[in-house]
Image (cartoon, rainbow, N blue to C red):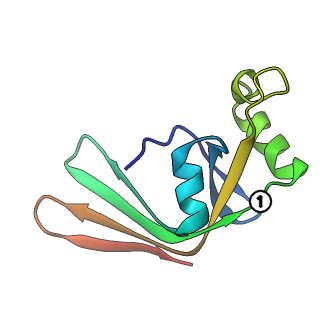
Amino acid sequence: MRPIGFAMWYKDHLCIALGKHKAAYKQLLDNTNLEICAANDRGEWLRVQGTANFDNTPEAQAAAFQVMPQLADLYNEETGHKLGIVYLDHLSARLFSMSGVVKDIMNY
């Protein structure tokens, strides 16, 4: 489990960004199954599952920097850290409630 601080829609895909130097990025290279979970203040949680793919084109990175300009402070020539863009295929999302109700949000 890792916290993810960035997500964007890019070329019709849900994308996350991870430092290529981080263990989470390296783990995704070995096992492309990915699950993201998020909760809200109403006692609901969203479970997103998919297969990780990698888009390390300059265009994808530029899109991430445009969405969150602060990333450029962390991922640049000076720091030596490189940003990896991961997009999800075979995406499904389900919303769960404490009462046991499950709602399919997306199958993509």
Is 11 located above or below residue 63 in the figure?
below
Is 78 located above or below residue 84 in the figure?
above
Q: Residue 22 versus residue 41: which sits nearer the camera?
A: 22
> Residue extending furthest left?
99
Res 96 quadrant in image = bottom left
Res 32 quadrant in image = bottom right
What residue does disc 1 label? Answer: 55
Q: Position of residue 79 (x, y in %)?
A: 75, 23
In the picture, which quadrant includes the C terminus?
bottom right
The residue at the point 77 percent across, 63 percent down is 11
> Residue extending furthest right?
58
Is 64 located above or below residue 9 in the figure?
above
21 with respect to 82 (left or right): left
The residue at the point 72 percent across, 41 percent down is 83
Q: Position of residue 66 (x, y in %)?
A: 79, 35
Q: Helix, strand or loop at disc 1?
A: loop
For disc 1, the neighbor class at 10 Å (few under 14, some 14 to 19, many from 20) is: some
The residue at the point 53 percent across, 58 percent down is 27
The residue at the point 49 percent across, 42 percent down is 4
Q: Which amino acid, by three-letter code, is at mark 1?
A: Asp
